[in-house]
Image: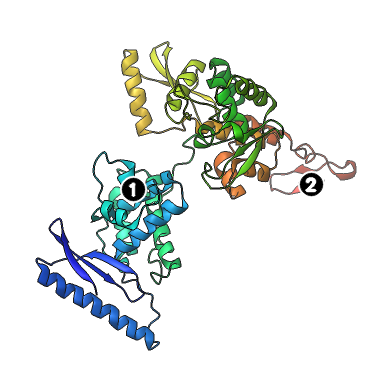
């Protein structure tokens, strides 16, 4: 038997559906216990009818008349168990912006967050669980999620959201519904074929040119020079390098191991060490106080997961990389680089002082974003330079930890202008068109045909 209870002036229904799954949902339109009990009886009667239809072979047991709340609860717990907590957190926020989420108190400790980071007993799980709040789609059941609602939701946010963010929101919602289909909770994904019609801006981050990479290393002091070199010669992600410990570095096999628990895709891989990086890591290992701790610790001896971005930006400014205000003949100007690394100069006629010029630079960056140089750009540089030097794309994909070569080539393999020019220069049939076969010359006349 189910039960009805009140929480925050709202009445909730707690019952078992025809598959035995526990369902907890808001009893909308109920003002007292009597009305909530009637709603509960109606729900249980409907589930009993479905169960009888299944027994008679007239119903397949799967339908889309399922409440969002119990499905979302199970999916959030599934993401915490199977994905990194940072990914589970991002997907939780994405779903909260569409179908809804569970209320959380401000400045809440992680141990009291929902879903919890670590395994929690059932009684404790009930205690920390917050009330369910519908999202902007304002749907209570799966069958209420329609392509028209998704299109209206996307159209209302095109001006305030980036295209990449909207695409992520819709894709996470699809992943949630696909999981419910695989679990047998619903019959089908109602928005499987929905396309947002948006195109994410390509090139959010660009790779460094070889000259810029050398300038960055030359302008950086230790230990940052070794850290940037490790990024450039291993292609590791920020989180992977920050959590790298000395047992992961093998000087006997000359490899660095990215453990499964630190990898974004939960796949372990071994990366050969560059000779220069090996020498620097060996020197750090000899001076390390804790040979079992992190390779690059901060001042407190902990993994360097914070403040490294600020250090990287400072080194970029010192190396002269990135957008900056420069003096022009007519006043102040902007010096930047495009995604191919070529310098681009723009005038700032309205700026009279450097402060005004920097303010206009920030305004232009927000209005017309350009590919930025961040720590992740070093990973792009690693992949780009390997492919430029003729490395097998499959090998590069394996070193980066990608599941497909297409991901490596489409996102991480940048093309420089000199590469295009060199490719055209390799063509050797351009001069042969003017020479005929066996000494006979062929001339292309105005009609587009060859004359001997």
Residue closer to the observer: 61 or 426 = 61
Q: Quadrant of the N terminus?
A: bottom left
- Res. 228 image quadrant: top right
Which numbered disc covers residue 19? none
Going 90% across and 44% down the picture, which residue do you hit? Answer: 438
* Residue 438 appears in the figure: yes
Q: Is residue 437 left or right of residue 227?
A: right
Label 1 element class: helix
Residue 187 picture location, percent across and down: 40, 72
Which numbered disc covers residue 93? 1
Label 2 Cα crowd, 10 Å radius (few <14 / some 14-19 / many 20+): few
Residue closer to the observer: 63 or 301 = 301
Residue 273 picture location, percent across and down: 67, 31
Going 40% across and 33% down the picture, which residue do you hit? Answer: 369
Q: Earlier in the sequence, mark 1 or mark 2?
A: 1
Residue closer to the observer: 395 or 349 = 395
Q: Nearer the viewer, mark 1 or mark 2?
A: 1
Label 1 Cα crowd, 10 Å radius (few <14 / some 14-19 / many 20+): some
Label 2 element class: strand
Asked whether the beta carbons under mark 1 and mark 2 sit within 8 Å of each other, the answer is no
Going 80% across and 39% down the picture, which residue do you hit? Answer: 432
Residue 264 picture location, percent across and down: 51, 44
**Total numbered circles:** 2
* Residue 384 appears in the figure: no
Residue 405 picture location, percent across and down: 62, 48
Label 1 and label 2: CA atoms lie apart by: 70 Å
Placement of 215 over or under 130, stated as above or below? above
Q: Residue furthest bottom?
A: 56
Placement of 268 over or under 362, stated as above or below? below
Placement of 231 over or under 354, stated as above or below? below
The residue to which callout 2 is attached is 451
Q: Is residue 50 left or right of residue 261?
A: left
């Amino acid at each position: 038997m189910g039960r009805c209870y009140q929480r925050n002036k709202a009445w909730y229904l707690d019952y078992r559906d025809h598959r035995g799954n526990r369902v907890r949902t808001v009893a909308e339109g109920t003002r007292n216990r009597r009305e909530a009990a009637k709603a509960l009886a109606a729900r249980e009667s409907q589930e009993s009818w479905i169960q009888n239809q299944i027994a008679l072979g007239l119903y397949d047991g799967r339908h889309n008349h399922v409440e969002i709340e119990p499905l979302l609860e199970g999916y959030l717990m599934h993401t915490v168990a199977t994905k990194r907590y940072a990914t589970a957190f991002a997907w939780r926020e994405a779903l909260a912006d569409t179908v809804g989420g569970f209320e959380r108190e401000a400045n809440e400790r992680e141990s009291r967050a929902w879903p919890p980071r670590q395994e929690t007993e059932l009684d404790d799980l009930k205690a920390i669980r917050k009330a369910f709040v519908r999202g902007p789609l304002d749907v209570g059941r799966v069958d209420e999620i329609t392509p028209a609602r998704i299109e209206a939701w996307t159209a209302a946010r095109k001006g305030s959201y980036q295209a990449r963010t909207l695409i992520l929101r819709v894709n996470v919602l699809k992943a949630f519904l696909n999981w419910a289909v695989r679990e047998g909770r619903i019959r089908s994904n109602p928005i499987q074929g929905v396309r947002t019609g948006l195109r994410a801006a390509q090139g959010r981050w660009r790779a460094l040119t070889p000259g810029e990479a050398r300038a960055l290393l030359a302008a950086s002091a230790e230990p940052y020079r070794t850290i940037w070199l490790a990024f450039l010669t291993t292609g590791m992600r920020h989180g992977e390098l920050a959590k790298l410990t000395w047992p992961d570095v093998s000087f006997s096999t000359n490899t660095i191991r990215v453990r499964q628990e630190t990898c974004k895709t939960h796949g372990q891989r071994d990366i050969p060490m560059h000779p220069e990086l090996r020498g620097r890591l060996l020197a750090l290992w000899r001076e390390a106080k804790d040979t079992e701790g992190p390779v690059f610790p901060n001042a407190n001896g902990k993994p360097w997961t914070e403040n490294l971005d600020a250090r990287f930006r400072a080194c970029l400014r010192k190396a002269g990389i990135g957008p900056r205000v420069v003096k022009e003949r007519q006043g102040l100007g902007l010096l930047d680089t495009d995604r191919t690394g070529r310098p681009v100069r723009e005038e700032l006629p309205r700026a009279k002082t450097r402060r005004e010029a920097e303010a206009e630079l920030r305004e232009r960056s927000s209005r017309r974003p350009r590919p930025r140089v961040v720590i992740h750009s070093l990973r792009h540089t690693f992949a780009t330079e390997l492919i430029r030097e003729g490395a097998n794309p499959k090998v590069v994909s394996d070193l980066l930890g990608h599941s497909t070569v297409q991901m490596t080539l489409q996102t991480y393999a940048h093309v420089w202008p000199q590469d295009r020019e060199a490719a055209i220069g390799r063509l050797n049939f351009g001069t042969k068109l003017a020479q005929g076969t066996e000494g006979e010359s062929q001339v292309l006349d105005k009609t587009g045909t060859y004359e001997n």
